[in-house]
Amino acid sequence: MKKLLNRPDIEFVVNACDAGREGELIFKHVYDLSGSKKPVKRLWISSLESSSILEGMEHLKAGETYHNLAEAAVCRAQADWLVGMNATRAYTTKYFKKLTVGRVQTPTLSMLVERQKQISGFKKEKYFNVVLDCDGLIVEKKKIFDVEEAERVWKTCQGSDAIVEKVESKEKTVKPPKLYDLTTLQREANRIYGMTAQQTLNAAQSLYEQKLITYPRTDSQYLTSDMEETAKTS
């Protein structure tokens, strides 16, 4: 690959790695190690459909456009190494047992611990709901913790007429749900089908390679404006 990237008959290099932060990092590592100084152009596509690839090749972007994305990936990798490697060794040697520490896993673990503390410290408390049924119109006063207050509300409603003082009618637009990013897809697959995060990723990757879905390792839930026409014809 080093020889290929430095061939004199090649005018520029096309970065066709995954359209994301980690794809930029993979290309950066290979390109930097090759020592190549050739200009870089970026093929940025989220689908392996032939039409998408051809269109992407016709609209290659300047490689430096994604420089900051590559630098973000470098920061992520270095932070993972610095925190994970050093803190894991520190805690393992201090407590004489294998304790892993990570940039993401440790804050996540902290959230789980705090939530478990809330669950463990929860105390049951009796409350009352007063429900008023007016010929199918249900009005409910929820969670009254004082039984005397609940009975007072109930007795006040006995034998009384309900008066509708105001009726408002509004038109609302319900927007379609956002598209899945990898995290929401994994969460929903786990909730509905009990799939692990890795199982969901493997399934999504397989579908992507079969040209059935777009790039799965994304944190975006939107289509870019340049995909509007493509989405209409798909």
Image (cartoon, rainbow, N blue to C red):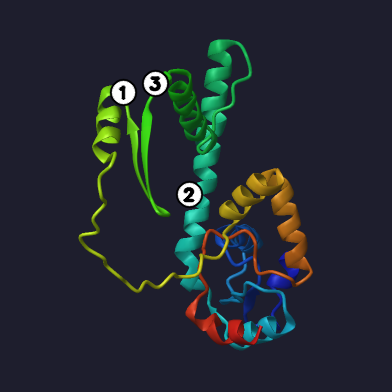
Q: Residue 231, position in %: x, y?
A: 60, 81
Report the residue marked by disc 1: 147
Quadrant of the image for the N terminus? Answer: bottom right
Crowd class of label 3 (few under 14; some 14 to 19; many from 20; radius 10 Å) = few
Q: Residue 120, position in %: x, y?
A: 48, 19
Say which residue appears at 50% left-offset and 37% top-offset: 103
Q: Which mark is residue 161?
A: none
Q: Residue 207, position in %: x, y?
A: 75, 64
Circle 2 SS class: helix
Say which residue appears at 59% left-offset and 21% top-offset: 99
Q: Amino acid at mark 2?
A: Cys
Closer-to-camera residue (56/133): 133
Report the residue marked by disc 2: 75
Cα separation, mark 1 vs mark 3, equals 12 Å
Q: For residue 195, say whether it is visible.
A: no
Q: Is residue 53 above or below residue 141?
A: below
Q: For residue 99, say whether it is visible.
A: yes
Q: Of the residues under marks 1 and 2, which one precedes in the sequence?
A: 2
Closer-to-camera residue (188/221): 188
Q: Of the residues under marks 2 and 3, which one precedes in the sequence?
A: 2
Q: Residue 182, position in %: x, y?
A: 60, 56
Closer-to-camera residue (130/233): 130
Crowd class of label 2 (few under 14; some 14 to 19; many from 20; radius 10 Å) = few
Q: Quadrant of residue 141?
A: top left
